[in-house]
């Protein structure tokens, strides 16, 4: 079932924990049992899973924080790459949370909907065709993140390549390039990182940031603890 792949992929980009390390074999088995991913993507994922399984936990956590918490251009908050700091995010978050609730996924008040592991956990509850359709909509963002992780020689690239493959989407080059044109500082360059996290001006009226597709109009920055690992 496709739900197994989405559940497994929701765990891998979560903050590394002892529980995640212990679940590495289950994650590998879930991905293999579905047989939905091309061989090259499964091999990439196996490299990441092996790193999670065998590396020191504190090293894993430090790497994760450097990549996804300190580097805005690698944010796992999908709407960070769409709305930035525009005023659209408030209603977008409400709409996406409503969509989750309509499908029976309830999140608590501290959770916001567009954190990638949470989004993938939601997709794991949907029929395959519907999950693919929703995943295809941010495929250009996922592809751009894969490119940035490739530049850093990070095994996490595998997650984003796999998601694009699962979506069966062909991200438009111009949309990927638009994301890649955003600043992408070195995580060790503190001045550059501070500059990218400065508040951006809020736009109002017709010139405000908007999105053409349904999903991207419903998502913005969020953070969720590590999603449940697959069983």
Image: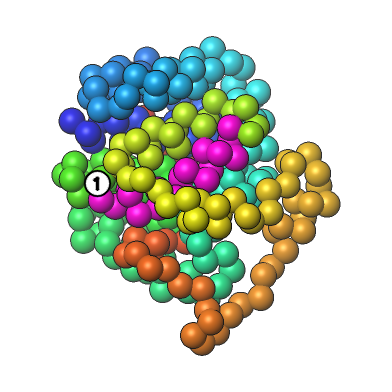
In the rendered image, residue 202, in percent from the top left (x then y), is placed at 61, 77
- Determine whether, in the image, residue 71 is placed left or right of residue 16: right
Q: Residue furthest right?
A: 191
Vertical order, 39 against 73 (above or below): above
- Determine whether, in the image, residue 133 is placed left or right of residue 47: left
Residue found 59% across the figure and 45% down from its top: 74
Vertical order, 230 against 142 (above or below): above
Residue found 34% across the figure and 19% down from its top: 39
Please report the bounds of the magenta region as a residue range: 133-150
Q: Residue furthest front?
A: 173
Judge whether residue 90 is colored magenta. no
Residue found 30% across the figure and 27% down from its top: 37
Quadrant in which residue 165 is drawn = top left
Could you say whether the residue bearing mark 1 is in a helix, strand or loop? helix
Closer to us: 153 or 18: 153
- Determine whether, in the image, residue 27 is placed left or right of residue 149: left
In the rendered image, residue 115, in percent from the top left (x then y), is placed at 45, 50
Q: Main secondary structure of the magenta part?
A: helix
Quadrant in which residue 86 is drawn = bottom right
Q: Residue furthest bottom?
A: 205
Judge whether residue 134 is colored magenta. yes
Quadrant in which residue 196 is drawn = bottom right
In the rendered image, residue 215, in percent from the top left (x then y), is placed at 34, 60
- Determine whether, in the image, residue 122 is placed left or right of residue 217: left
Q: Which residue is mark 1?
A: 131
In the rendered image, residue 6, in percent from the top left (x then y), is placed at 31, 36
């Amino acid at each position: 079932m496709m739900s197994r792949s989405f559940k497994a992929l929701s765990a891998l980009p979560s903050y590394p924990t002892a529980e995640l390390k212990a679940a590495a074999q289950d994650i590998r088995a879930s991905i293999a049992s579905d047989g939905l991913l091309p061989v090259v993507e499964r091999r990439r994922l196996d490299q990441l899973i092996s790193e999670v399984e065998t590396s020191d936990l504190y090293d894993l956590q430090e790497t994760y924080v450097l990549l996804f918490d300190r580097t805005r251009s690698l944010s796992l908050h999908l709407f960070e790459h769409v709305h930035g700091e525009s005023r659209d995010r408030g209603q977008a978050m409400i709409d996406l949370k409503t969509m989750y609730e309509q499908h029976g996924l309830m999140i608590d008040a501290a959770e916001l909907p567009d954190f990638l592991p949470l989004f993938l956990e939601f997709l794991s509850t949907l029929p395959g065709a519907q999950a693919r359709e929703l995943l295809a909509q941010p495929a250009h963002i996922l592809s751009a993140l894969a490119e940035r992780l490739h530049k850093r020689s990070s095994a996490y690239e595998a997650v984003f390549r796999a998601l694009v493959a699962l979506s069966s989407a062909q991200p438009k080059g111009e949309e990927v390039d638009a994301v890649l044109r955003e600043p992408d500082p070195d995580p060790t360059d503190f001045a550059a990182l501070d500059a990218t996290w400065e508040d951006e001006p809020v736009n109002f009226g017709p010139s405000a940031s908007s999105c053409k597709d349904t999903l991207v109009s419903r998502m913005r920055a969020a953070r969720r603890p590590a999603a449940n690992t697959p069983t």
